[in-house]
Image (cartoon, helix red, strand yellow):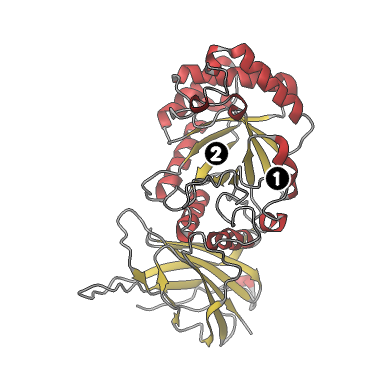
């Protein structure tokens, strides 16, 4: 296969030329076989900054554990919360605070917070609780209101669609009365994507004068599926909201406010694949879900940033590093893509002399647990020789990972293939190419 770098045109000699990165995937089988090359194309010019699709769900618990520095390094786009204790930490991280109102009422599993009835059977009392939350939130900035969590999942809501719509309408009406037209109100935060539900929801709001400023659902399915479905769902929801019949619903953003399922929560490549899918689908915001840890404890409430750091401690887990490097890539992103759904890639340009790639070989629904050997080819025309440093974000589950030492570091000719050590399925390679 002939690999050629694209010319940068008028960008000047210091511009980073297009890169063709070939991934030669060699699997260890009883009967060895050759797999076709995978090509990653990286565009020559930075696209500029991109917004973060990495958020958190109930993760940064007070009173300061884990340390704020571990949160700030992730630059989350938003954090979903259920009380005001996290607001200061969320704002300090530069993230939007999304208040989940249903947490104030409770769910079937706790007898609706001891009330014994769902909110649609006591709308006046529900409205009073929403009013109290609105008054507590008055004057707070970067605030969003999520009316009900997983409104199509019996664990959290057992009523019909129409009963949920009534609950939403009452909350919307109260929030508008208290906070005015600037309040950002949305939902339905479905447990599973359901385009028919979303269509009925928007139609209801058009008919009853409510708005859905962000349209939201969850993609943390089990067993894991194809991350490309996330992109397809986001595009379908945006197209739905753009239909003339639904424009009065006022959808401004598409939000997937839980991603990464329980099986994949410690797999760096799966987290990378979901982030790439959110970006490719045009979702405006996203958030990582929280699950039980390996001891059966909830990492929603144990000061672990949704299972990214040791509970209450100062040590990051391996997957924390994926979100940290993702945050670092936001300022100057390069357009990049692979010609196979089994490899997720994000490329960025920290400075004029450096390119950095995150490459994850993730487990798809038909992707067996085997090794992959990755080879970079083509040329970053940063000079006749470049320094290549490779680090691996491993699958270390709940073991602390305080640093990512280089697993390879060497000089290379950027016009020739650059060998990268084996990358195991579910890991992420952090590849830095620099002109010395």
Q: Nearer the viewer, mark 2 or mark 1?
A: 1
Work out which residue is located at the far left of the displayed protein and give it.
Answer: 31
Check the picture and name the quadrant holding the N terminus.
Answer: bottom left
Q: What residue do we see at 35% from left, 56% from top?
A: 364
Look at the numbered discs 2 and 1 and tell me whether their residues touch, using CB distance below 8 Å: no
383 is higher (above) or lower (below) than 104: below
Q: Give SS at disc 1.
A: loop
Q: Quadrant of residue 324?
A: bottom right
Q: Position of residue 162 (x, y in %)?
A: 47, 17
Q: Quadrant of residue 196?
A: top left
Q: Quadrant of residue 113?
A: top right
Q: What residue do we see at 63% from left, 62% from top?
A: 328
Q: Along the horizontal axis of the image, is 50 left or right of 36?
A: right
Q: Along the horizontal axis of the image, is 290 left or right of 173?
A: left
Q: Position of residue 93 (x, y in %)?
A: 71, 50
Task: Tell which circle, 2 or 1, labels the residue nearer the N-terminal end.
Answer: 1
Question: Is disc 1 surrounded by few (<14), some (14 to 19) or many (20+) residues within 10 Å?
Answer: some
301 is higher (above) or lower (below) than 391: above
Q: Residue 62, labelled with which disc?
A: 1
Q: Position of residue 419 (x, y in %)?
A: 44, 81
Question: Is disc 2 surrounded by few (<14), some (14 to 19) or many (20+) residues within 10 Å?
Answer: many
Q: What residue do we see at 46% from left, 72% from top?
A: 20
**Is residue 180 in view from this perspective?**
no
Q: Position of residue 356 (x, y in %)?
A: 57, 70
Q: Give SS at disc 2.
A: strand
Q: Residue 254, labelled with which disc?
A: 2
Count of numbered badges drawn on the protein = 2
Q: Nearer the viewer, residue 220 or 195?
A: 220
């Amino acid at each position: 296969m002939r690999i050629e770098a694209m010319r940068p045109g008028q960008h000047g000699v210091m511009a980073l030329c297009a890169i063709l990165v070939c991934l030669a995937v060699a699997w260890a089988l009883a009967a060895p076989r050759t797999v076709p090359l995978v090509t990653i194309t990286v565009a020559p010019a930075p696209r500029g900054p991109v917004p973060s699709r990495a958020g958190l769900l109930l993760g940064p618990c007070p009173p300061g554990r884990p340390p704020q520095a571990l949160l700030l390094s992730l630059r989350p786009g938003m954090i979903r919360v259920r009380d005001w204790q996290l607001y200061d930490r969320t704002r300090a991280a530069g993230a939007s605070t999304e208040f989940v109102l249903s947490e104030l009422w409770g769910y079937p599993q706790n007898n609706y917070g001891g009330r014994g009835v769902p909110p649609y059977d006591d709308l006046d009392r529900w409205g009073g609780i929403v009013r109290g939350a609105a008054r507590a939130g008055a004057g707070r900035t970067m605030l969003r209101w999520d009316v009900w969590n997983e409104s199509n999942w019996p664990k959290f809501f057992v009523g019909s669609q129409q009963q949920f719509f009534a609950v939403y309408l009452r909350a919307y009406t109260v929030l508008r009365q208290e906070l005015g037209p600037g309040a950002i109100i949305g939902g339905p935060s479905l447990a599973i994507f359901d385009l028919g539900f979303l269509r009925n929801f928007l139609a209801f709001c058009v008919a009853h004068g409510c708005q859905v400023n962000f349209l939201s659902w969850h993609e943390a399915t089990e067993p894991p599926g194809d991350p490309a479905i996330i992109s397809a769902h986001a595009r379908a929801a945006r197209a739905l909201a753009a239909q003339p019949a639904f424009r009065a619903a006022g959808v401004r953003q598409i939000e997937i406010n839980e991603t990464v399922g329980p099986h994949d929560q410690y797999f760096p490549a799966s987290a990378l694949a979901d982030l790439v899918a959110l970006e490719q689908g045009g979702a405006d915001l996203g958030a990582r879900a929280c699950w039980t840890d390996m001891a059966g404890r909830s990492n929603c409430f144990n000061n672990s940033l949704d299972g990214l750091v040791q509970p209450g401690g100062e040590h990051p887990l391996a997957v924390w590093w994926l979100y940290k490097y993702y945050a670092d890539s936001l300022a100057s992103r390069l357009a990049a893509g692979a010609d196979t759904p089994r490899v997720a890639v994000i490329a960025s340009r920290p400075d004029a002399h450096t390119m950095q790639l995150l490459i994850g070989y993730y487990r798809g629904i038909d992707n067996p647990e085997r090794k992959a050997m990755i080879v970079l080819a083509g040329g970053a025309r940063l000079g006749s020789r470049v320094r290549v440093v490779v680090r691996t974000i491993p699958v270390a589950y709940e073991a602390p990972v305080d640093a990512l030492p280089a697993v390879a570091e060497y000089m290379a000719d950027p016009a020739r293939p650059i060998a990268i050590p084996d990358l195991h399925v579910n890991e992420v390679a952090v590849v830095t190419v620099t002109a010395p």
